[in-house]
Amino acid sequence: PLLGVVMAYTAHEEALLRTQARNALLTLLSKMKKSDGQLLRTALEMAKSRLLTPLCTLLWQNYANMAQAAKSRNTQALQKWALREEDLWDHLAELIKLDITDVTQMICGV
């Protein structure tokens, strides 16, 4: 149950909550990688629906917000959404750095 809650908060609007959830997720996955294979497989199954879908949705919403900000020439909003995009890509990169083949394949689509 804890892992599901953590995954849900990785795409949260509030930056502090989002960061803490992402750090917890990275810690949990790295510990699972070193231990029980069944536990990791269960976590990866959960990640397919509870982690990547919300993060991809957030990325597309973010691009739409950036486009709207650019169209309206709102530089402050554009900067806000650009920073949020960078934050999201950093999180995806951290997940890839865990070197868990299934996670990398989910993110990269290979």
Image: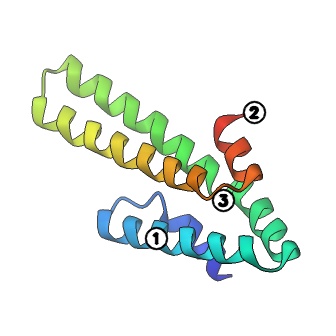
Q: Is residue 99 above or below residue 86?
A: below
Residue at numbered disc 3: 50
Q: Nearer the viewer, mark 3 or mark 2?
A: 2
Residue type, mark 1 in image: Asn
- Disc marking residue 23: 1
Residue type, mark 3 in image: Arg
Mark closest to the chain's N terminus, 1 or 3? 1
Q: Is residue 55 above or below residue 73?
A: below
Label 2 neighbourhood size at 10 Å, few (<14), some (14-19), many (20+)?
few
Residue situated furthest top in the rendering: 71
Residue closer to the observer: 85 or 76:
85
Q: Is residue 71 left or right of residue 63?
A: left
Mark closest to the chain's N terminus, 3 or 2? 3
Q: Is residue 36 left or right of residue 26?
A: right
Mark closest to the chain's N terminus, 1 or 2? 1
Residue 17 in picture, x, y percent from top left: 37, 71
Residue 27 in picture, x, y percent from top left: 55, 74
Q: Secondary structure at mark 1?
A: helix
Kindly report the distance in space between the C-alpha atoms of the residues bearing marks 1 and 2: 25 Å
Residue at numbered disc 2: 110
